[in-house]
Amino acid sequence: MIEFFKLYYEHLPAWWPQIVPAIGNTIGLTAGAYMLAVVLGLILAVGKTSKIGPFRWFCTGYIEVVRGIPSLAILFLLYFGLVPLGIVLDAFTAGFIGLGLSGSAYIAEVFRAGLEAVHKGQREAALAVGMTPFASFRYITLPQAIRVVLPPLLNMLIMLLKDSSICSLISTPELMLRAKDLASEYFLPMHVYLLIGVLYFALAFPLSLLAKMVQKRMSSSRRVTE
Amino acid sequence: MSDILLRIEDVIKSFDELEVLKGISLELKRGEKIAIIGPSGSGKSTLLRTINYLEIPTSGHIYLDGELVGEKQVEEKFVRTSEKMLARFRAQIGMVFQGFYLWPHLNAIENVAIGPQKVRGISKEKAFALAEEMLAKVHLDHKIKEYPERLSGGQQQRVAIARALAQEPKLMLFDEPTSALDPELVGEVLKVIHELADEGRSMVLVTHEIGFAREVADVVYFMDEGVIVEYGPPEQVFEKPRQTRTKAFLSQLFSH
Amino acid sequence: MFDLAQTIYFSKVLMIGAVMTVKITFGALIIAIIVGFIMAAIRTYSKIRLLEIMVNIYVEIFRGIPPLAQLFIIYFGLAYAGVKLEPATAAVLGLGLIGGAMLTEVFRSGLNALHFGQREAALAIGMTPMMALRYIIFPQATRITLPPLGSYAIGLLKDTSIVSAIAAPEIMFYARNLVTSTFQTTLIYILAALLYFILSFPLARVVDRLERKQRAWT
């Protein structure tokens, strides 16, 4: 057991300078993918309830199809599959677009549930007191929808953080890829992967606590809307 | 057949260190209606729950129609019976809970019919016919297909009463049946219970509704801190209580 | 440019992988259900504080670390420690344990949703404890847990794609092999994606229906 930790003591000084920028990349990758997913997700959610037929069909179809395909397959398609068509993305770009595209389908469902959770009558009541449709969305629907949406949105962020690790399979330079390189370079897979596991956990756990806290807060104040 | 339907014999119930029932004995004649009153924490609900062995007495015995409930006598000793035997006794005792406890995955008529069907092995058609009859008895024949979620508290409690009636029980137990209800819904439930009392059913009623207890009960028991402080006909207990604790409880009630 | 014969050939090869994908999914699902149920029962009913804490730690750790990292720990890490697992075995084990952590929450909410009074009411009308479980508790628990369980199964099916990274011979593994021998990246990866979609779509429909049914009931 002591032997086991001694190896960390020996190697950590050499590993650490390589790992730190990789953590930065993982965070950047996650943040980029998340922003893309939120923006696309919002568009898809609105599109799914749109009155314009083709737009609605496209959004509905997109959500269904993307939810049925592993992120890894999407990443491979973007990174390798587009090359014959003359589109060459670097691994980082392919990674963040791929994660964003697959994440957006889930986030769209989250937004839709949020909008549906606010009863139609509330909007009508807002219009009845003389609010414009925009004001009723801004002051009545949105504040309530956010309460429903915030906890699952945070959970999606955690999901994306973890999913970003699979970008290593298309050689995006992030934490997991660095881990693979170190593991094969030093022949210490157990040490490296455990360390990497701890690092991911250290990134995800505060978010998970935050999500739980928000959830508790929200569910105590949500009853009002129901 | 003896005249005594229910006999509670020196029942003691402790939860860990806390003794909730400190030796309770009472008898109920066939067709008799007993009301148990007392402050919260007096042990009255626990007592009611020992009658059908939802609460197992630490010592003491329960007899229904002269037969031991939940136990059997082997030579001189009392031993617990199997769950199956126990279930057979419970089937003879209807119970109505404070919290209704309807089963949300079943609609009103299914809630009432599942007992006859699964416990007594009656055919589905007969069980549903019986259930419909019982729901009519509680004036809910127009709500038989509703799920509990869509019923008001008073309606839910009436379904729960119908569910108990469908057992065709020898004895009905009511555990504060109106305490969880909004004030305006109390009346409809009390009315149903009153009608059942008028049919001459045997019942034990734990309640806070003093006025109702007085109207319906043949005997009123006042419990406090795990003992029966006094009992007697309602006029006597309510108007001429002999014990100071009873007086204190009643005067506190009416001062509110 | 489009070659039908080649497409059929690719599809056939990928189908071999699909069988393994389904096998891994089922294996992991069974482990996840068993582990998740036990953990949920401990969390709900255990009075031993230490046991509860251990379950919480298990859930947090397995949910907080990327599946790929856990897979590498189990496969490469254990091999280094002298335990050599088949790739498919490591995949089933790894995904199953991760799933167990996910399902702990699902089963726990299923168990929690049932008020103890429900069971008491069943006993009071003369049901035996077994009957109460069979007619009252089980039907409700399944209705509550089935939709999230279905969603989890879909997620799991897709997550099996990452086990190609430890060379378990499933869809993505065969896809990558085909790519190295034919360089038809676009076609092969589209076919692979399509195959996943075909596998998951019926499941998604079932989950959808269950969710709608549940909404009608509550």
Image: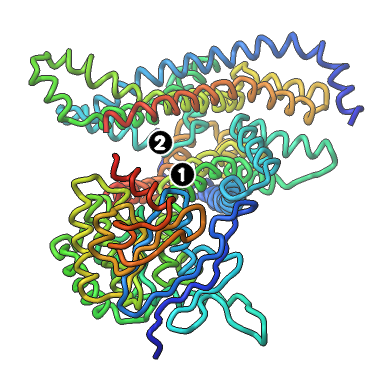
Do callouts 2 and 1 mark residues in contact (Cβ within 8 Å)? yes
Confirm whether residue A84 shows in the render.
no
Q: Quadrant of the N terminus of chain A?
A: top right
Q: Which of the 4 quarters of the picture holds residue B37?
A: bottom left
Q: Is residue C188 above or below residue C146?
A: above
**Spot occupied by residue B23 in the image (x, y as percentages of width and height):** 55, 64
- For the residue marked with disc 1, what is the amino acid? Ile
State the residue in front, C70 or C122. Answer: C122
Confirm whether residue C193 shows in the render.
yes
Residue at 65% across, 13% down: A22
State the residue in front, B190 or A108. Answer: B190
Q: Is residue B172 above or below residue A13?
A: below
Residue at 24% across, 26% down: A47
Few, some or many residues within 10 Å of mark 1 (<14, 14–19, 20+): many
Q: Is residue C192 left or right of residue A172?
A: left
Residue at 39% across, 46% down: B248
For mark 2, name the chain: A
Residue marked by disc 2 = A67
Q: Is residue C150 left or right of residue B76?
A: left
Few, some or many residues within 10 Å of mark 2 (<14, 14–19, 20+): many
Q: Residue furthest right?
A: A3
State the residue in front, A218 or C85. Answer: A218
Q: Is residue B4 left or right of residue C181?
A: left
**Spot occupied by residue B57 in the image (x, y as percentages of width and height):** 56, 66
Q: Which of the 4 quarters of the picture holds residue B125?
A: bottom left
Numbered circle sitting on residue C154 = 1
- For the residue marked with disc 2, what is the amino acid? Arg
Label 1: element kind: helix
State the residue in front, C69 or C126. Answer: C126
Q: Is residue B91 left or right of residue A173?
A: left
**Spot occupied by residue C141 in the image (x, y as percentages of width and height):** 44, 54
